[in-house]
Image (tube, grey):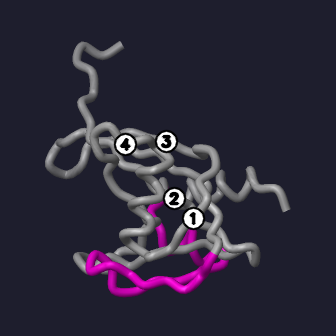
């Protein structure tokens, strides 16, 4: 046990699937890296509402939020604590309009999505896919 607990900002991300086994990834405008849609939860906001709100803000999509599939903690480059929870989501539409935070999107097949994402986000994609029901 550590002497000091991690104080962390909480973020929620969606692993958004289409029925054709493609997952939504977004390219950040800040550094050109790829990520899953999501962001920080607001105070007093339910998890499902927060995940849906963040995905809608970043993509204009309405999604169905399923169960959490992965979570992790870390410290960023500035030493600030972070806690992320990834949820499996299903898209009900596929026409994406990205927010100014992103300049590109892709409905990628699983291997291509994994290769563009960070290791933790790739793990979230794998776990979300492993838990799906065809």
Q: Which residue is mark 2?
A: 14
Magenta residues (range):
93-119
Which-is-in-front pick, marks 2 and 3?
2
Pointer 4 or 2: first along the chain: 2
Q: Nearer the viewer, mark 3 or mark 4?
A: 4
Asked whether residue 96 is drawn in magenta, I would say yes
Which badge, 2 or 1, is on the more N-terminal residue?
2
Cα–Cα gap, marks 3 and 1:
20 Å
Which element carries disc 3, helix, strand or loop?
strand
Residue on which the image places disc 4: 45
**Label 1, label 4: how many angstroms apart (C-alpha)?**
17 Å
Q: Residue at x 33, y 42 (%)?
A: 10
Quarter occupied by the N terminus: top left
Q: Is residue 123 left or right of residue 40?
A: right
Q: Position of residue 20 (x, y in %)?
A: 75, 78
Relative placement, left or right, of 1 versus 8 is: right
Task: Give the spatial CA distance, label 4 vs label 2.
Answer: 16 Å
Question: According to the image, label 3 marks what residue?
Answer: 71
Which badge, 3 or 4, comes first in the chain's sequence?
4
Above/below status of 89 relative to 26: above
Q: Secondary structure at mark 2?
A: strand
| Residue under pointer 1 | 63
Q: Mark 1 or mark 4: name the one nearer the start of the chain.
A: 4
Q: Work out how far the residue at label 2 is from the one at label 3, CA to CA, in angstroms.
A: 12 Å
Q: Mark 3 vs mark 1: which is more N-terminal? A: 1
Name the residue nearer the viewer: 39 or 64. Answer: 64
User: Is residue 79 on the magenta stretch?
Assistant: no
> How far separated are the C-alphas under marks 2 and 1?
9 Å
Q: Which picture quadrant has residue 89?
A: bottom right
Q: Position of residue 121 (x, y in %)?
A: 49, 58
């Amino acid at each position: 046990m550590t002497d000091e607990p991690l104080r962390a900002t909480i973020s929620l991300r969606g692993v958004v699937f289409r029925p054709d086994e493609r997952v939504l990834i977004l390219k950040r405008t800040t550094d050109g890296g790829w990520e899953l849609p999501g962001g920080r939860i607001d105070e007093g906001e339910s998890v499902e509402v927060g995940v849906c709100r963040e995905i809608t803000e970043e993509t204009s999509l309405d999604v169905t939020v399923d169960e959490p599939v992965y979570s992790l903690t870390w410290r960023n480059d500035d030493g600030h604590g972070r806690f992320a929870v990834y949820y499996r989501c299903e898209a009900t539409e596929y026409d994406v309009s990205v927010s100014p935070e992103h300049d590109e999107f892709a409905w990628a097949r699983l291997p291509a999505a994994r290769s563009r994402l960070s290791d933790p986000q790739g793990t979230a994609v794998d776990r979300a896919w492993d838990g799906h029901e065809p």
